[in-house]
Image (cartoon, rainbow, N blue to C red):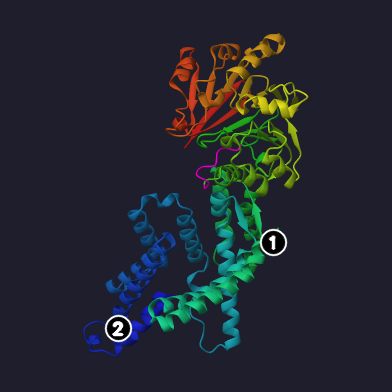
């Protein structure tokens, strides 16, 4: 818009001067328009959408100066090339795909014959009707074409965005932005007035849009599309928005739309992504110095701890846990297990309960701890983690091995340090066993070893499984005793620690203790996130940074 304004003003000024005898007004004004676009893009932060617009204006300007009539896709391609030349990492930005994707969809869907100027003989009402039809079609094209990209990057799409854009785009383009630019460049006595007008208009716009955003049905969540399914959806988009008459080809367009909307099929119904009965998947997040592990069975989800708050700003539930759950298409947590009350295990609890559905809480939290009041606030039932508790989900047995709770819980929590009250949970199927240990230390490990000796049947069954152990207390020197390691005999051990953390976890002495027994030790600092999947007799592991 500002580039067009710059071209119009430049052309008018150029025609009034003698410079027109040396350079045609059309060529000179195109340079002025490009400079105006470049200046505004710099003021706006020169993000990828602004870069795309500026480079498209620049490519059009070069086309005029070289005497070539460029096809719209030629302009789009040169802008794409320049953006990637300046910053090759731009392809990992959502703005890159959304901005270039939206423009390419418009150029593809609105063919040349549809965007030609209207006949001057048409009545104003007819011109307005055609303009509104074109605007509606453009908005529909953008909305449909960006569904795959929006789901891929944000795991949700907005149902109110077409209406919100129809209101916001003209208001921001023709009222807010011009007043803001006038306020930036006019003397202060006029500039302040225009800035106030711009702010007042934008404030009114927010009052209109905010209720729309708060509607329960404003947003639809969906899993992140992957691989072939994403390409199938993009093919559906191409079929749906293709140029031509809509009424004569509505059947094939509806089929294309259905291919696109197939992205909303629940993950458990997609071949290759479904977890079978008796199998499970474990996700160990690279969360820093703390624990956060997701266990998925065929139809249930268990979250073990919620990671640490970092400097009061990084909330693991907001930044890692909930985005991952949405990307996986998980709508709720069946059971949230809080191993104990240390801050590096409960950092994301508040945000998680406030923004996600949790059916049940389970853990070792004292009765007068502030978290108990939080549980009551969000009306989520809490149950104490007790040694001997067990339940079954989809052919998977889940068993609690620690702590043993006494009748006087208040005295027990007061007398025993929180680490030694950590909830220790085993997840076991026919071939594999996962032990999530929290922060237990030597005393808790000794109690578990004694329980294994007392229950020889369970101990013998555990030793017959391929076992993955969470390093107790992140691999500290006060845990991972030789007796505990020998009793469980794990094949793999993982720890979740912070890079160069002040506790020096995992301690080299503990790591060496595991390595001496030929146990593979995997720390998230080195591996990034770990994803373990039990499939039959195989235990597959992938890492992700």
Q: Position of residue 178 (x, y in %)?
A: 46, 78
Which marked residue is nearer to the observer: mark 1 or mark 2? Answer: 1
Q: Position of residue 208 (x, y in %)?
A: 63, 71
The question of residue 310 being in magenta is answered with yes
Most frequent secondary structure within the magenta stretch: loop
**Image quarter for residue 442?**
top right
Q: Position of residue 489 (x, y in %)?
A: 57, 13
User: Relative to 543, does residue 226 appear above or below in the rendering?
Assistant: below
The residue at 70%/33% (across/down) is 366
The residue at 46%/31% (across/down) is 527
Measure how far apart labels 1 and 2 are at the Cα level: 51 Å
**Numbered tag placed on residue 318 in the rendering:** none
Q: Dot 2 lies on which element? A: helix
Q: Which residue is mark 2?
A: 25
Q: Dot 1 lies on which element? A: loop
Q: Nearer the viewer, residue 361 or 149?
A: 361
**Image quarter for residue 25?**
bottom left
Q: Nearer the viewer, residue 177 or 316?
A: 316
Q: Is residue 459 visible?
A: no
Q: Which residue is mark 1?
A: 215
Q: Which residues are magenta?
A: 306-313
**Which comes before the other along the chain, label 1 or label 2?**
2
| Residue extending furthest toward the left | 22
């Amino acid at each position: 818009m500002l580039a067009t304004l710059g071209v119009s003003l430049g052309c008018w000024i150029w025609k009034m001067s003698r410079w027109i005898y040396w350079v045609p007004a059309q060529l000179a004004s195109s340079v002025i328009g490009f400079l105006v676009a470049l200046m505004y893009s710099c003021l706006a932060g020169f993000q990828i959408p602004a870069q795309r617009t500026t480079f498209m204006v620049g490519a059009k300007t070069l086309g005029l100066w070289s005497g070539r009539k460029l096809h719209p896709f030629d302009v789009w391609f040169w802008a794409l090339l320049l953006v990637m030349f300046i910053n090759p990492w731009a392809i990992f930005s959502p703005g890159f795909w959304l901005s270039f994707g939206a423009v390419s969809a418009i150029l593809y869907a609105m063919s040349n014959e549809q965007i030609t100027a209207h006949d001057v003989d048409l009545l104003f009402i007819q011109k307005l009707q055609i303009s509104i039809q074109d605007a509606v079609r453009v908005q529909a094209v953008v909305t449909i074409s960006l569904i795959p990209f929006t789901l891929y990057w944000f795991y949700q799409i907005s149902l109110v965005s077409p209406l919100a854009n129809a209101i916001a785009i003209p208001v921001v383009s023709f009222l807010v932005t011009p007043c803001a630019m006038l306020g930036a460049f006019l003397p202060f006595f006029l500039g302040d007035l225009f800035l106030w007008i711009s702010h007042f208009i934008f404030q009114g716009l927010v009052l209109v849009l905010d209720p729309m955003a708060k509607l329960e049905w404003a947003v639809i969540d969906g899993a992140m599309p992957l691989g072939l399914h994403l390409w199938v959806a993009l093919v559906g988009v191409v079929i749906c928005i293709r140029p031509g008459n809509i009424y004569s080809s509505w059947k094939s367009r509806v089929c294309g739309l259905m291919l696109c909307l197939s992205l909303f099929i629940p993950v458990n119904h997609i071949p290759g992504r479904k977890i079978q009965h008796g199998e499970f998947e474990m996700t160990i997040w690279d969360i820093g110095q703390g624990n956060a592990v997701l266990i998925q069975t065929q139809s249930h989800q268990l979250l073990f701890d919620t990671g640490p708050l970092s400097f009061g700003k990084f909330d693991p539930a907001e930044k890692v846990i909930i985005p991952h759950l949405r990307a996986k298409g998980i709508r709720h947590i069946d059971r949230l297990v809080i191993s104990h009350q240390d801050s590096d295990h409960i950092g994301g609890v508040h945000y998680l309960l406030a923004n996600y559905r949790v059916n049940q809480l389970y853990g070792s939290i004292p009765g007068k701890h502030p978290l108990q009041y939080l549980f009551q606030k969000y009306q989520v039932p809490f149950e104490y983690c007790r040694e001997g508790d067990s339940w079954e989900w989809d052919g998977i047995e889940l068993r609690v091995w620690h702590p043993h709770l006494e009748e006087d819980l208040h005295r027990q929590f007061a007398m025993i340090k929180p680490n030694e009250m950590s909830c220790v949970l085993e997840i076991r199927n026919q071939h594999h066993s996962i032990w999530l240990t929290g922060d237990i230390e030597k005393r808790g490990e000794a109690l578990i070893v004694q329980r294994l000796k007392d229950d020889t049947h369970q101990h013998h069954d555990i030793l017959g499984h391929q076992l993955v152990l969470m390093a107790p207390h992140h691999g500290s020197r006060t845990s991972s005793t030789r007796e505990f390691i020998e009793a469980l005999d794990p094949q793999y051990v993982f720890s979740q620690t912070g890079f160069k953390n002040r506790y020096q976890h995992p301690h080299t002495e503990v790591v060496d203790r595991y390595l001496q027994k030929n146990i593979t030790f995997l720390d998230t600092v080195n591996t990034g996130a770990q994803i373990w999947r039990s499939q039959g007799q195989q235990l597959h592991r992938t890492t992700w940074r």
